[in-house]
Amino acid sequence: MWKFLLPFAAFIALAVLFAFGLNPKRDIHALPSPLIGKPAPSIALTDVMDPARPVNNSEFKGQVYIVNVWGTWCEACRQEHGALLEIAQQKVVPIIGLVYQDQRDKAKLWLEQLGNPYAAVAFDTDGRTAIDWGVYGAPETFLVDSRGRIIYKFISPMTPEVWRREFLPRIAAARGAGA
Amino acid sequence: MSAKVPAPRYAGRLIAALLIAVALCLLGGVTARALDANGQLEDPTLQARFERVVKDLRCLVCQNESIADSNVELARDLRRQVREMLVAGKSDDEIFDFMTDRYGEFVRFNPPLDRKTALIWGAPFIVLLLGILIIVRVVRGRSRMPLDDEASPGPL
């Protein structure tokens, strides 16, 4: 009897595998970050608006904050910009921008034209800070808790819905833990 | 005769200029970070290690290319990182650890054999064993069947 059930079982197993593997909603480029739960790497760069002004994420230590990686070459970053402006207005957490593989003038113009949701915008001149954060594209958004650990990474454009569903509960939990 | 008088001074200047030129060349060699004109590491053993290491690192933007083959900026940045770590005397394992700490095991084309990857490495052998088992069963079953010419008419 089991001989007749075997092909059937194999079919079910394949169907389950394909349902997961070929799911069009699954982003195959989104990789889990090994940095989750680890201390956030340091950002020690200068402000995109003013090369003389340092931007250091150690200044944000002790509070929950967000690091958003973007570049003017990145179309999805333009898409998410409205959502970031909206989030900034809620004043829940400060957002640090990290400009990646870009030119200062272009990034400056972008912020002047589209508005600036960031508490500070760091300009990564040579991509080293991005490597430390395991960045491999843009936009990428990290959530850092008040102990300075990365607790979440979101790879894709930010939307108000993602913000409500993925970020707000984690921010509340991080604060609730008395961290 | 009087024209010869300034000669030693010229010679002195010439020697000074040469010395400065040599010093500049030496300095230039240092600041070029041990790279030759083709952008290769001057030490051939380091260059060989460089080529081996970057072939085993995945370019996460293009995913099926190694950072040795990819031209995207991230691959360029990572190649520079590997080169600098080699020149700084880091071992291959230290470089791989640096990359997996930031990008995860996926960054390696050739993941190390450990508890997490044991199934992947073992799967071909498990499948091979299964195949052998199936063949043995089929062959044994057939050998118990009567040969065609001596076969009595089967129950049809």
Image: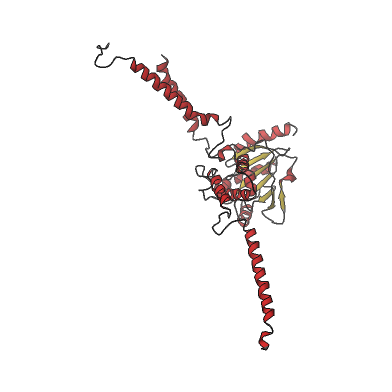
Residue visible at 67% across and 85% down in the picture: B4
Q: Residue furthest front?
A: B1
Q: In what quadrant of the picture does the N terminus of chain A appear? A: top left
Q: Residue B75: x and y, percent?
A: 55, 48
Residue B78: give x, y in percent of width and height: 58, 48
Seen at 55% across and 30% down, the residue is B118
Q: Is residue A43 left or right of residue A72?
A: right
Which color scheme did the rendering employ for the protein?
secondary structure
- Indicate left or right for A155 with A51 as reference: left
Q: Seen in the image, is B126 located left or right of residue A42?
A: left
In terms of image quadrants, where is residue B117? top right
| x 67%, y 34%: residue | A170
Residue A107 vs residue B21, the one in the foreground:
B21
**The furthest residue to the bottom:** B1
Provide residue B63's location: percent of width, then percent of height: 52, 42
Q: Position of residue B107 (x, y in %)?
A: 56, 40
Residue B33 picture quarter:
bottom right
